[in-house]
Amino acid sequence: MPRKILILSPHTDDGELGCGASIARFVSEGDRVQYAALSACEKSIPKGYPKDILSCEMKEATGILGIKDPIILNFEVRDFPKYRQEILDSLLVLRERLRPDIVFTPSSFDTHQDHKVTREETLRAFKQCTILGYEQPWNNITFNTLAFISVDESQLERKIAALSCYRTQKDKPYFNGDFIRGLARLRGVQIEEQYAEAFEVIKWVIR
């Protein structure tokens, strides 16, 4: 049976950065993957770009990974702590609508305030689901590499291609293809595979 997988991304791009190659693998294996971004980050858009540019870039990026109709909510970037209850309510709606088996969310070690709220409310909303925290080294002082998903060359290339859609973010070093490949190679070496992505086990449910 195909798994139902939900990728929760506090902002447009976090899901692709944290588990883009795994998304490509899940889609290729026939799993039902849905992607939800909690903010389109309109306050963070560089000068000269239209206000919906990050939403457009996200739709293009997730399309490359094989996701149709990503969900975009409109919580204000950097203000998630103020909207904690509203975020929980939105996640509960997603839970009832999608009924996922596995949820990917930021890790417990992520220092960004929006990411921390997303992780905490994910744990409250999805009590019946396996929850894995994805790795974002620029926000993590430490990280528990307790779960690994091996990915192949084509899946990694899809992740790199998806991230290249974020033209507004191209100057950030963690969007660099060499960095993405190097991290995947490091995680692959740890499990004797060519490439992998690493995750924190926040909760593991077996039925």
Image (cartoon, grey):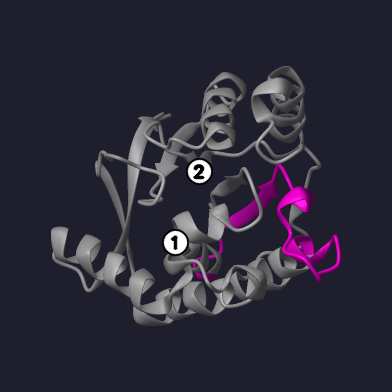
Residue labelled with disc 1: 22
Residue 178 position within the rendered picture, expressed as x and y whole percent measured from the top left: 35, 78
Quadrant hosting residue 184: bottom left
Pointer 1 or 2: first along the chain: 1
**Range of the magenta residues?**
28-55
Q: Is residue 22 above or below residue 115?
A: below
Q: Amino acid at mark 1?
A: Ser
Q: Amino acid at mark 2?
A: Phe
Quadrant hosting residue 75: top right
Q: What is the secondary structure assignment of the residue under circle 1?
A: helix
Residue labelled with disc 2: 104
- Residue 191 seen anywhere in this rendered image of the structure: no
Q: What is the secondary structure assignment of the residue under circle 2?
A: strand
Residue 147 position within the rendered picture, expressed as x and y whole percent measured from the top left: 28, 45
- Residue 141 seen anywhere in this rendered image of the structure: yes
Which residue is located at x 24 percent, y 70 percent?
185
Closest to the observer: 207 or 162? 162
